[in-house]
Amino acid sequence: MRKKTLITVLLAATVAATGMLPAAVLAAPAESAKAKKAKAAKKGKKKPATRAAPAAASDYYTGEFVNFNQWQEVRAFTDDMVARHGFTRPELEALMGNVRYLDSVVQLVKPAPPGKPKNWTAYSNRFIEPIRIAAGVRFWNENADTLARAEALYGVPAEILAGVIGVETIYGRDTGRFRVIDTLTTLAFAYPLAPNRDARMAFFRGELEATLLYARQTGIDPQSLQGSFAGAVGLPQFMPSNILKYGVDFDGDGHIDLRNSTADAIGSVASFLVGHGWQREQPGQIVYPATVSPARAWERHADGSLEAKFRPEDLTAAGVVTTSTLPSGMFYGLVDLQNGSEPTEYWVASNNFYTITQYNRSYFYAMSVIELGRAIRLARPVP
């Protein structure tokens, strides 16, 4: 399998040098041994740490050698970085000469096979569980002052900040074992065939650009950055462009370090949420349990939108009933959490719920953040 993958990638490099579509994308290779290893590694557990140091240099997936400097699109990217950002061609060519193609990430970004129904209960059980809750209690206790300071400054509750970091990496326990430069280069120039392939490649080229800028600004070697199979970095799993936009030096040491500083991670998550519309003064709850009428007039409101756009009276008229009165003068949305063959859960969500979906565009994700944060708060000893 390894030999087949290597042949496919070398063909990709040859074809890409002529400007044609890379062969590695035209004929997506079968899952390599490294891809299987990457998936299996996700099940492993590492010792929890409040300050999670990056893995040792040998503790990442090394991938296959490809001479990316021969690829026409890579050469164009290099030209653009030289022209717009003042990098030198030799330094970028030397860097690209060390980049490895990661077939495993190509496999991991492919969409799941269709047909399997969504199941909120199964999804939430992965995150709202005793190990993660206990780790969250320790994290909150060890960083109580920092969480309180972030809540006071940004208006984002400590339980939401703890929920995000817990869902993302179990408080730094699992921040990823892929070199970010390898991941982003692979996805920027050899993304698998998909209807949105061009848009995704453009996105990852932007993230590769942001990685190089971030590394230069902070004086780190871009090859030292490790992260997820999508290129996300650190305790809060920020994409590199979001580090540049929303990263905060919350511990005041002069550097934004989301890999090692829990304070920077906490402040940066709060900064991100505020930057995406978190409302400090929003009254009431983030979500409200709801029931829906058998008449199904409410269905037009359960449209999968990531925006609060309905008034309370609109939802009431459609047959949506909440267990408590919704604050007036605000907009809401109807969230449906499908449960496979079991009944769907319905919630009425406020603006701040949809702000969390900007971190990960999923109702399941946002609700897991809320529920994990709540579980951690309730599990903490009462002062």
Image: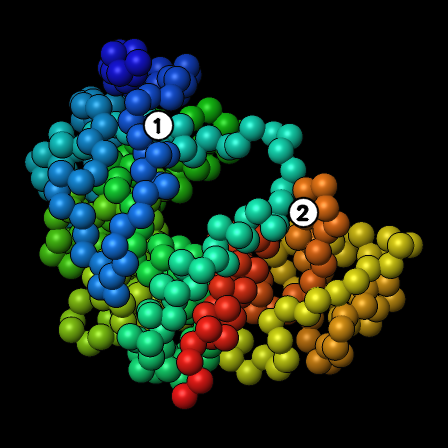
Residue 358: x and y in percent read 50, 58
Amino acid type at circle 2 is Asn
Q: Amino acid at mark 1?
A: Lys
What colour scheme does the image use? rainbow
Write the residue at 36% across / 57% down: 170
Question: Would you identify the image quadrant in which residue 135 lies?
Answer: bottom left
In this image, 371 relative to 146: left or right? right
Residue 140 shown left or right of residue 97 in the figure: right
Identify residue for label 2. Answer: 339
Examine the rendered structure and indicate whether residue 132 appears above or below residue 121: below
Q: Closer to the camera, 52 or 335?
A: 52
- How many numbered circles are shown? 2
47 vs 118, nearest the viewer: 47
**On the rendered structure, is 22 left or right of 214?**
right
Q: Is residue 173 above or below residue 90?
A: below
In the image, what residue occupies the spot 10% across and 34% down? Answer: 94
What number is the disc on residue 36? 1
Decide: few, some or many residues near mark 2? Use Cα within 10 Å; few <14, some 14-19, many ≥20. some
Compare residues 309 and 382 and report the one nearer the observer. Answer: 382
Percent position of residue 193, x then y:
46, 24
